[in-house]
Image (spheres, rainbow, N blue to C red):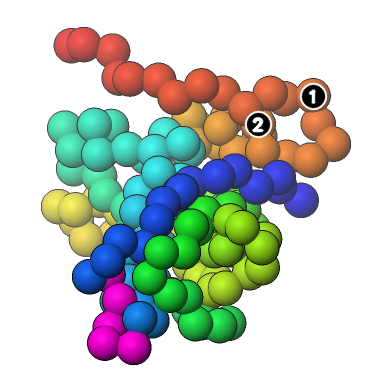
Amino acid sequence: MYRHIETYRGFVYPGGADHKGRVSHSFFAQRFDEASRQFMAFLGLSPAVLAPGDRGAIAVEQRTERKRDVVEGALLHIATELLDLGARHLSFVHRMYDSETMEEVARAEFLGVCFDSIAGVSIEMPELTRAHAMGLLIGTDHPALPLRRPAAA
């Protein structure tokens, strides 16, 4: 089992909601996308790491559940938990909370893979990703690793 980390904290700005003051599905999708990018970077799969090579990371499955309406002015945060890290895939869940009430307002589960963008096939997860994931394991003495920038070539 893995511990969660915060991957997003924000506010629903005026104009971020519809005419009734509720946010749309696209709002949730955008926040979950931002949280995914932060989580992938935490696991060592940041754009700076992936861009120079022919590697990428992509969600092959996503399931989103809206639990209640979120209105303009709401303070929100997302906690993300790794569910599984396989040789070529990872799955994780984002839980979005109303930061004032701590009520879960939405969740999204993802299944992702690393891939070779030239060959178009999935590849094994980098060792750095495994090391960062070890830092999230509950009940181990592996501390979470800090984010590292790739060494200059």
Q: Is residue 106 above or below residue 141?
A: below
Where residue 84 sits, quadrant-wise, is: bottom right
Image point (49%, 82%), residue name: 69
Q: Is residue 144 above or below residue 96?
A: above
Q: Amino acid at mark 1?
A: Asp
Q: Main secondary structure of the magenta part?
A: loop
Identify the secondary structure beneath mark 1: loop
Magenta-drawn segment: 16-20
Question: Residue 45 in the image: x percent, y percent?
Answer: 37, 40
Compared with 130, 55 (above or below) is below
Q: Is residue 123 left or right of residue 47?
A: right
The residue tagged 1 is: 141
Q: Amino acid at mark 2?
A: Gly
Front-most of 26 and 136?
A: 26
Residue at which label 2 appears: 135
Left or right: residue 130 versus residue 140 is left
Residue 153 % position (x, y): 18, 11
| Residue occupying image coordinates x 59% and y 43% | 5
